[in-house]
Image: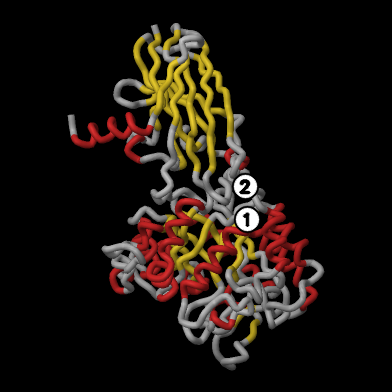
Amino acid sequence: MTHSTTLRRLITAIMILISVSGVNGAGRTMFEPDTTRVLRNPLQGWVMYLGRAWDENFWEEKGYDRMTAKGETAPVRVSDYASCAYIRTSWASFEPKEGEYAWNDPDSRLMKLLKSVRDRGLRVAFRIVVDGRDQGQNTPQYVFDAGAKGYYDPKNPGHNLSPYPDDPVFQEKYSRFFREFARHFDNPEEVEFIDAYSLGKWGESHSMIYKDNANKESVFNWMISLATDCFKRVPMLIHYHRMLGDPDDDGWGSVPADAEKLISTAINKGFSLRHDAFGMHGYYQDWEKKMAHKWNFKRPIIMEGGWITGAHHRYWRDPSGLYREGHAEDVRKGEYDAAAEARVNMMDFRINDETRSWFEDAFPLVKKFVAHGGYRLYPVSVEAPVTAKPGKSVKVSTVWRNLGCGYCPTNIPQWNQKYKVAISLLDGNGNPVKTIVENRSDLSKWIREKDGNYRTSFPLDGIAPGKYRWAVALVDTTASNRPGLEMAINKDLILENGWLPAGEIDIN
């Protein structure tokens, strides 16, 4: 017997209480949750950001593999605490010349960078920026050579040409690119989400410049329809910014009359939500809070903190007065509290100093979000027969709980309830011999203080007499009912194939 086997049996004996009722011949297995392990489930956890100019060597060069963490005696790796890596990059970086796509060249800097992320078990996420203000030229030159009309950055006349989003040539070229992009990246095994309405300054969907401001809604509908048509499996996000698509250059004027309507239109077409100003009390105000509350547990929310620790973007000037100059932990706490109020599913490590600040100044909050952020699902109990006759049908009762402040968004169209509770009989080698999916299970309904309770019929026909183990999992019904979501259970109790044993049965 190996040391790991002995340890697993010891932990099982300690953590699991099995009681057998002599009246109905059922055994009940109770589980205690694991609240510390990082679970890399989709649309849950921490998002680490990638710099658009980085290459695959940044892990060491930027110190991401040896990050000092508050309260820890040894350095930690940022990638060990993240679920995915998010990059805001330009259309020009993906298609510098018409029809020449970066994903067709595995030796390109961008694709090597993304591969280094996937090699660490992280998914990737994207925002593709076309507006070049305050940045370089994000739209390929060939678009303008083909006749698209645009404008220059007022701060840098004659440089950084940006397209008018209501220009027909721009829309034609961008649509072709975006469809090719989706053909390659509409893969939920590798891609977490896509910021699919990334027009405007910094791709944040505000401060738009049109040829004709009357085209605001038609441009919005074009972009939303394009994304909906292209991404069928990867979740799409919309920025619930009050000035969504608006030409107001301030970016934070009074709320336009159509703001809520546009966001609702996108959500009703399958978009989920994000906001880029968490912790900024002058920007993330009552309207934004009400919008988050309106869609809580209907669509997941992804957050980004608004302040950075650099002196040019002074967080201590926040109108709340809560952030002390030189105390980055204050703004990190502000972001965390705003995220908890909005019930977000994902928080962000942004690049360089922001990432270091989370680890050096606020690492307890990082671990707190691991324990309580997003969704964190586990089986409270499994009750199943310990004996049965061959060919009979038996009942298995399960109770499931979510420890997180967010929810498991199985109700979004791209997932279409693909994750379900499943019960299996395992042979002596731990392999499933029969699996029953509880099709009534809806993981999106499991929120704090609302458990999922199911009594599932399990036919034993076709099962040879013998001894078996019951097991449960949260399976992906689009992947041959294999375990698809990590459960918040001590990892030593879970088999390598993802099934969690939950009692035994003797069929004779």
The residue sitting at 50% across, 69% down in the picture is 332
Left or right of 199 in this view: 503: left
Q: Which mark is residue 272?
A: 1
Residue 282 locus on image (x, y percent): 66, 76
Q: Is residue 165 above or below residue 7?
A: below
- Circles 1 and 2 in contact, beta carbons < 8 Å: yes
Residue type of the residue flagged with mark 2 = Ile
Q: CA distance from mark 1 to mark 2?
A: 8 Å
**The N terminus lies in which quarter of the figure?**
top left
Query: Viewer-proximal residue, 317 or 438?
Result: 317
User: In terms of secondary structure, where does tag 2 sit?
Assistant: loop
The residue sitting at 52% across, 32% down in the picture is 421
**The C terminus lies in which quarter of the figure?**
top left
Q: Is residue 409 visible?
A: yes
Residue 66 locus on image (x, y percent): 29, 67
Q: Which mark is residue 412?
A: 2
Residue type of the residue flagged with mark 1 = Ser
Q: Is residue 139 visible?
A: no
